[in-house]
Amino acid sequence: MESTNFSAWLEKMELAHPLVIAGPCSAETEEQVLEIAHELKKTDATVYRAGIWKPRTRPGNFEGNGAKALPWIAKVKEETGMLTTVEVANAQHAKLALEFDIDIIWIGARTTVNPFAVQEIADALKGTDKIVLVKNPINPDLELWIGAIERFHSAGIKNLGAIHRGFSSYKKTKYRNNPQWQIPIELKNRYPKLPIICDPSHICGRRDTIFDVSQTALDLKFEGLMIESHCDPDKAWSDAKQQITPTRLKEITEDLRVRKDRVEEKDSVKKLTDLRSEINLLDKQLIELLAERMNVAENIGVVKKEANVAILQRSRWQEVIQKMVNEGGQNGLSSEFIERVFKAIHQESIQHQEKIVNS
């Protein structure tokens, strides 16, 4: 997957902004689909999206109009010239999408977690030149995400891309789905030519933070955005809180800043070089401090072994993490970040102590 035809296609588009995919969460009626499409034609959106098969957590919620909505999507292309995309969840969906010449197929997060379903869809699309975008799985599992992309690549699908829509978490945060940016960054590190589209609508779960997440995605050099848009979001049949109007979409895309790939001004290059040297020094010091901490943890393991004391002391751990969260907050660091860092440190400390106790 070193290079894809999709990445070449994106370059040829020569857009003023990165690729913008927009449209309603659900295709509700033909009138609604076409009204939104004509409004989006006035924005930077190039691709029209709409959910027609909606995998819902619980039965009884609107699950889409299904194949009945495909002619509506085809009419969008006929009337506006926009490209079209829908989500498919099984091989039959894929075959129907091909019949209606849908330009881009996307695989949803709930489907990505199922290798059998992914393989069946890949087999159904074999031999086509359709663009396939694979959303990350619900849980933060990079290998599962890569595995799904590889299945399409192995089936001869060369027009591949990924969609980052965030990851579910048992803990409530300000996001509907935690972005965990390090995961798509690692995907990009492994496959530099694989385009990644950000889905801020599903990350945020609410419309007021979509701009900030979109800007972060562009700062991380994502190739595009998939944003849910509806002419009357509050009356949408699904995911009303995270949809925005086409007018708001236009405002967002106009306000977004696309950063340059590298610093070119001499003064800025020198400043950046100096700051990076400072970062390198601090990183070295961090490693040395962590090594010292692990040495102390091993000494604690020796004492616990001699005293026949359990390695995990939950009350002590809770006391430490709360203290660090408080101190982190006083230094401008988020509680989520501090918890992630110290949970990793704590786990490493336990492993060091286990080696001592079990030796």
Image: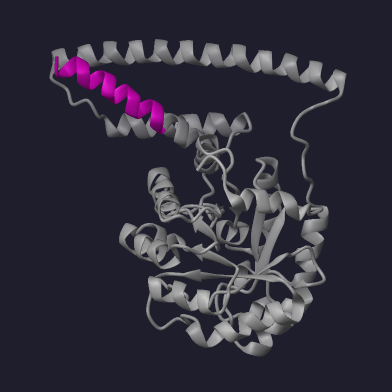
Using the rendered view, name the quadrant where residue 262 is placed.
top right
Q: What percent of the width, then of the height, locates residue 169?
A: 43, 52
Residue 304 visible in the shown view: no
Quick check: 297 left or right of 79? left
Residue 230 in view of the camera: yes
| Residue 97 higher or lower than 297, as above or below | below
User: In this picture, is 320 found above or below 29?
Assistant: above
Residue at screen point 25% across, 29% down: 312
User: Whole-percent x and y of residue 135?
Assistant: 50, 57
Residue drawn 40% across and 46% down? 141
Residue 352 is a magenta residue: yes
234 in magenta: no
Q: Nearer the viewer, residue 180 or 87?
A: 87
User: Of 355 and 173, which appears nearest the observer?
Assistant: 355
Residue 32, relative to residue 205: is it above or below?
below
Q: Is residue 306 above or below residue 107?
A: above
Please identify the quadrant where the C terminus is shown: top left
Q: Nearer the viewer, residue 255 or 78?
A: 78
The answer to which quarter of the image holds residue 246 is bottom right
Q: Main secondary structure of the magenta part?
A: helix
Residue 214 in picture, x, y percent from top left: 68, 52
Residue sitting at 77 percent across and 66 percent down? 248
Horizontal arrangement in the rendering, residue 218 relative to residue 55 (left or right): right
Image coloring type: one colour
Image coordinates of residue 9 in percent, x first then y, are 67, 53
Which segment is the magenta one?
343-359
The answer to whether 183 appears left or right of 303 in the picture is right
